[in-house]
Amino acid sequence: MSATVGTINESTGNISEYFSLKKTNQQLAEENARLRSLLLSLEPLPTDSLAGNLIPVDSADTTALSFELITAEIIRNDIRSTKNFFMINKGAKDGIEEGMGVINSLGVVGKIRGVSKEFSEGISLLNIKNPTSVKHQPSGRMGTVLWEGVNPKTARLLYLTPDVPVEPGDTIVTSGYNAIFPKEIMVGTVRSSEPDKNNTYLNIEIDLSVDFGSLSFVYIIKNHKKPEQDSLINLNPEIINE
């Protein structure tokens, strides 16, 4: 009898410890989101700000952030299809909107494509229909990362020409050329590079920085300046002939 009671007590303790740890992880994620929001809104953005090397932000004006990060937990995640999606436990009531970028502490995860009141669905970087604008950090040249639908740990970097000195280990980050992701968010590192058969572009394979098989907490990026940016992009001025 005493052995049974001991086993029950031990199980109860393990369950309590589990929920306590989960609560602690949630609190840490929320604090990281607050700090990263401040960092992303600073100019220039520290290149290692998403690698855990945080800087003091006590003097930052939290009422005038360009970017706000909302924490969420992955509750469903696909990596075995050619068109993968994920679901998070936050929705419209939490301020999530379609088109927002999603990252974690290691880099780009994807973007939101559908929102309900309580939940949101995102399109993963591991989706052959989800190109991402990036920059080859050493040269500053722009390109596009696109997953090929096979290996969840690698992708292709497109549209860099042979005159760009690309070497294994080079860092690939977001370009900041759209309103979805801030600039300098980690995407991956170059695995290999060689000219194509016509010597027109480089065939570049990169190792993705995010481990998509173990996603847990993520950050959804709210760009407070996006409406203003979109209004200019969609502007269609009349042509005036002088």
Image (cartoon, rainbow, N blue to C red):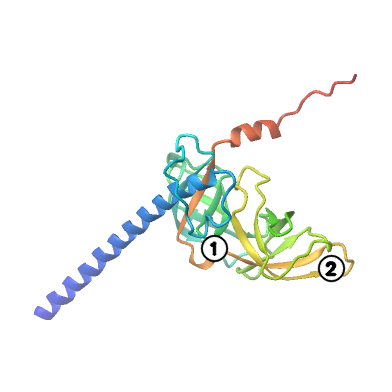
Farthest residue toward the left?
1
- State the CA–CA distance, disc 1 to disc 2: 32 Å
Q: Quadrant of the C terminus?
A: top right
Q: Quadrant of the N terminus?
A: bottom left
Type of the residue with mark 2: Asp
Task: Say which residue appears at 80% left-offset and 61% top-offset.
Answer: 164
Task: Say which residue appears at 44% left-offset and 49% top-offset.
Answer: 56
Between 65 and 198, which is closer to the camera in this rendering? 65
- Residue wearing tag 1: 78
Expressed as whole percent of the image width and height from the top left, the position of residue 44 reads: 59, 46
**Could you tell me if residue 127 is visible in this image?**
yes
Type of the residue with mark 1: Asp
- Rendered image quadrant of residue 139: bottom right
- Residue wearing tag 2: 196
Task: Say which residue appears at 32% left-offset and 56% top-offset.
Answer: 23
Expressed as whole percent of the image width and height from the top left, the position of residue 176 reads: 65, 47
- Rendered image quadrant of residue 234: top right
**Could you tell me if residue 1 is visible in this image?**
no
Expressed as whole percent of the image width and height from the top left, the position of residue 54 reads: 47, 54
Above or below: residue 69 compared with residue 128: above
Judging from the image, what secondary structure is the residue with disc 1 in? loop
